[in-house]
Amino acid sequence: MPAKKRCQFQGDQKCTSAVLRIVGHCPHCSADFCGNHRLPEHHSCAHMEDCRQQAFNKNKAKLESERTVASKMAMT
């Protein structure tokens, strides 16, 4: 049986926790992390600025798609 994958966090101390399947993979730096380090800001992701820009663009597109326009009704 192969050994469990270990977290790839390289902070002050190397993390030896097991990698989380599915949610432990960072799509920005392609590394695998445990539950404590899976978020880009928790593992000091090298591509943090790209991550922020991607989230900004996604939120911007969502807000623009939900934009409503008030109808101009004649006041009588």
Image (spheres, rainbow, N blue to C red):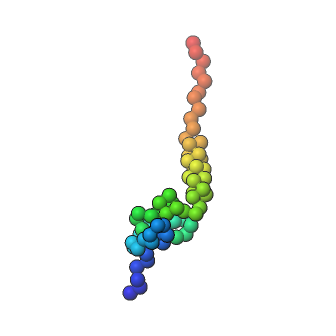
Q: Give the camera-side residue of 45 and 65.
A: 45
Q: Can residue 18 be seen in this view?
A: yes
The number of numbered discs placed on residues in the rendered structure image is: 0
Whole-percent x and y of residue 37? Answer: 44, 64
Whole-percent x and y of residue 71? Answer: 59, 27
Query: What residue occupies the far bottom of the structure in this picture?
Result: 1
Q: In this view, does 1 lie to the left or right of 29?
A: left
Q: Quadrant of residue 49?
A: bottom right
Which quadrant: the N terminus?
Answer: bottom left
Establish if 74 lies above or below 60. above
Q: Is residue 46 left or right of residue 10?
A: right
Q: Is residue 24 left or right of residue 63?
A: left
* Rendered residue at 41%/63% (across/down): 36
Which quadrant: the C terminus?
Answer: top right
Whole-percent x and y of residue 30? Answer: 55, 69
Query: What residue occupies the far front of the structure in this picture?
Result: 12
Q: Can residue 22 be seen in this view?
A: no
Establish if 33 lies above or below 70. below
Q: In which quarter of the image is residue 54?
A: bottom right
* Rendered residue at 59%/32% (across/down): 69
Q: Give the camera-side residue of 69 and 27.
A: 27
* Rendered residue at 44%/69% (across/down): 13
Query: What residue occupies the far top of the structure in this picture?
Result: 76
